[in-house]
Amino acid sequence: MRYPKEFWLLFLLLEYCYTHCQEDDLGALLGALNPGIFADGLPADKADLAEWEDTHRDDDLGRDAFINRVISFLQDFGRRYGFDFSRTLVLLETVDEEEYAKQLAAAEKEAAAWCDAHPGWQSSTP
């Protein structure tokens, strides 16, 4: 995992969306991305992780830039594999600054714990 903080932010935002919309296709994607399933701390489907990491352009974790990146990832993933994330996409656009800051703080905490548990993996945190 090259960018643990960004990955955890993606995962936690999608988990937040799932608790609100219960979209089946989102549940399937979350299952594939879940880093807690295997001892190596990586998602079950490493191809999905690679697709996410390929969207990395910069370290902009600002709400608008990051939400747009997640939306683009879901749209591309949905087109490629026939998944319907329509409710999730609408919900992502309504995530306010306060909720985003809460998810970012949780992602920073999860990424730090993940990096401690899996030494040797690169972190995007300077």
Image: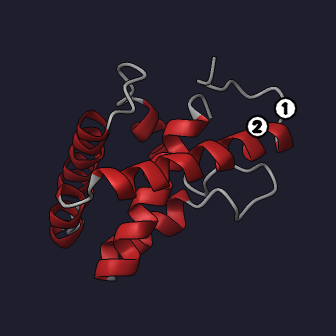
Give coordinates of residue 105: x percent, y percent: 55, 47
**From mark 2 to mark 1, how far is it between C-alphas?**
6 Å
Q: Tell me if I can see residue 59 in this picture.
A: yes
Give coordinates of residue 8: x percent, y percent: 55, 48
Count the marks.
2
In the displayed structure image, the side of residue 40 where residue 50 appears, left or right = left
Residue contact at pointers 2 and 1, CB within 8 angstroms: yes
Which image quadrant is residue 64 in? top left
Q: Which amino acid does label 2 sit on?
A: Cys
Which numbered dot is residue 115?
A: 2
- Circle 1 crowding by C-alpha within 10 Å: few under 14, some 14–19, many from 20: few
In the displayed structure image, the side of residue 90 where residue 3 appears, left or right = right
Query: Secondary structure under badge 2?
Result: helix
Which image quadrant is residue 13 in? bottom left
Indicate whether 65 appears above or below 111: above
Give coordinates of residue 125: x percent, y percent: 62, 24
Residue named by callout 1: 119
Image quadrant holding the C terminus, namely: top right
Image quadrant holding the N terminus, namely: top right
Q: Which amino acid does label 1 sit on?
A: Pro
Q: Tell me if I can see residue 23 in this picture.
A: no
